[in-house]
Image (cartoon, rainbow, N blue to C red):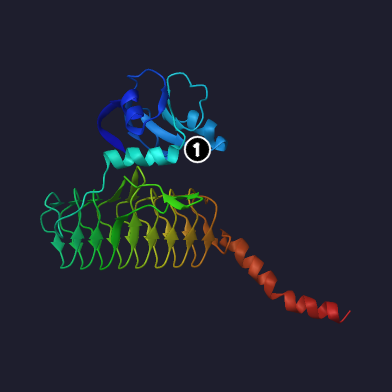
Amino acid sequence: MKFPKSHTLKQIATLIDCEYRGSEDFEILGINEIHVVEPGDIVFVDHPKYYDKALESAATIVLINKDVACPEGKALLISDDPFRDFNKITSHFKPFKASKSAIASDAVIGEGTVIQPNCFIGNNVTIGKNCVIHSNVSIYDDAIIGDNVTIHAGTVLGASAFYYKNRPEGYDQLKSGGRVIIKDNVDIGALCTIDRGVTGDTTIGEGSKLDNQIQIGHDTLIGKKCLIASQTGIAGCVVVEDNVTIWGQVGIKSGIKISKGTIIYAQAGLNNSTEEGKTYFGTPAQEARVSFKDLAYVKKIPEILQKLKNL
């Protein structure tokens, strides 16, 4: 998430009331999670296990809960609670803005697009040409939808990321300031839910087709011409490359990559990245031919047990 204009290290430190290490006029351009950081971004880290990863990342400002040596060319924001202060920054630059109408006055809707009754179109939403948005669809703030997109009834685009910190008093949510982006020629079925990015974008690539009742988590990137069948759940920060086919009721772990041309059979549970052009099945999922061999061996167990009894 980029700020509307650049800010200085001192300005951000003042905003969150913390100490800093580095030049007070060190330039800050935005705030991002570690998997999408760029120079000029703030990244936060609150566990020693991940200090090195954050300090060595592309981010040039690290919001951290320990006064460590500052890497050359970078700056530190020293906080007793980086998670809390990351939320403060997100809330300051991307505050919740209540809507006053079903279709926001600043929404941009392209020529030939049909919006059916009872839809909600939030602030700063852009919808392209020749789209059909069926009834009871909710499109939260800042979403961008391309041309020739169809979204069926009851789908929700842009709900908050499912991202929480466990505190003694309860779970604390990491606020979401990102967007949902739907590229051209995408079809989205009924009752799908696509969460906005925490700081970046959740993106559905051009020409991809989603069945009904699919959940896609925050910051996940779906490539071009993917097919995803009903009741699939894809966690946050997953990269799905082009021409992937995912059949029904598949569950996919966060932070993995599904390589180009992968096919995942129904009811698989995928915990690891895949290899290009291969087919997967089972829980935990593995190459389908291996899973089918394993199932064949399982079927032989009664026969083997009977032979052992007869010895």
Local secondary structure at mark 1 = loop
Question: On the rendered structure, is 285 left or right of 242?
Answer: right
Question: On the rendered structure, is 83 left or right of 158?
Answer: right
Q: Is residue 240 visible?
A: no
Q: Nearer the viewer, residue 90 or 121?
A: 90
Residue displayed at 37% across by 57% down: 226
Locate the N terminus by quadrant. Answer: top left
- Residue 154, image x and y in percent? 27, 67
Other residues around mark 1 within 10 Å, as few (<14) / some (14–19) / many (≥20): some
Residue displayed at 23% across by 58% down: 149
Residue 69's place in the image compared with 145, above or below, is: above
- Residue 102, image x and y in percent? 15, 60
Q: Is residue 220 visible?
A: yes
Question: On the rendered structure, is 189 left or right of 59?
Answer: left
Q: Nearer the viewer, residue 249 or 90?
A: 90
Q: Amino acid at mark 1?
A: Asp
Q: Nearer the viewer, residue 218 or 257?
A: 218
Residue 20's place in the image compared with 216, above or below, is: above
Residue 311's place in the image compared with 182, above or below, is: below
In the rendered image, which quarter is residue 156 located in? bottom left
Residue displayed at 20% across by 54% down: 122
Question: On the rendered structure, is 45 left or right of 135?
Answer: right
- Residue 272, image x and y in percent? 55, 52
Residue displayed at 34% across by 57% down: 194
- Residue 171, image x and y in percent? 46, 53
Residue 18's place in the image compared with 151, above or below, is: above
Q: Label 1 belongs to which residue?
A: 46
Q: As drawn, which residue projects farthest toward the right?
A: 311
